[in-house]
Amino acid sequence: MLFGLPWFAVIAIVAIGGGMIFSYKEKELALEEKRLFSAREANDLRGHIEHLQHRIEQLERRVNDEPFVGQLDDDQILKRTKE
């Protein structure tokens, strides 16, 4: 007898206590997994945003460097006005 309880009662109490600790750890791991998934998802989104920003900068550079269709030089405008 431990603490005045028979051995089978002590085993049951220890099993219940162990189950409660196991359940607590399981919930704690689930919350941590959710937090890590959110962090991983945020990092993926950050990477996509940086890629899109880089792509926008490339497109802006391309548009600013090359004259787009329909854009007339000053000489072409002058020739049209003289004609």
Image: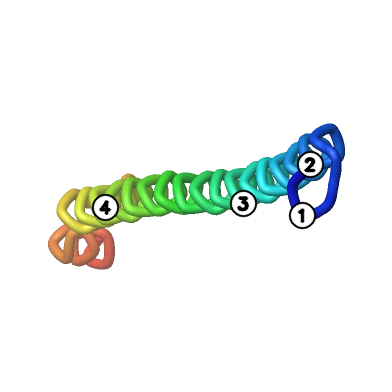
Q: Nearer the viewer, mark 2 or mark 3?
A: 2
Q: Real-space Cα distance between discs 4 and 2?
A: 79 Å
Expressed as whole percent of the image width and height from the top left, the position of residue 3 reads: 77, 54
Q: Between residue 37 and residue 69, name the one nearer to us.
A: 37
Q: Which residue is mark 2?
A: 10
Numbered circle sitting on residue 3: 1
21 and 64: which one is in front? 21
Tell me which amino acid carries mark 1: Phe
Residue position marked by numbered label 3 in the rendering? 28
Q: Gap in Å between the C-alphas at discs 4 and 1?
A: 84 Å
First in residue order: circle 1 vs circle 2: 1
Q: Which mark is residue 58?
A: none
Q: Quadrant of the N terminus?
A: top right
- Which residue was labeled with disc 4? 63
Q: Secondary structure at mark 1?
A: loop
**Nearer the observer, 48 or 31:** 31
User: Tag 2: residue type?
Assistant: Val
**Is the Cβ of the residue at disc 1 closer than 8 Å to that at disc 2?**
yes
Task: Say which label, 3 or 4, has the lower sequence index.
Answer: 3
Q: In which quarter of the view is residue 18 placed? A: top right
Q: Residue at x 32, y 46 (%)?
A: 51
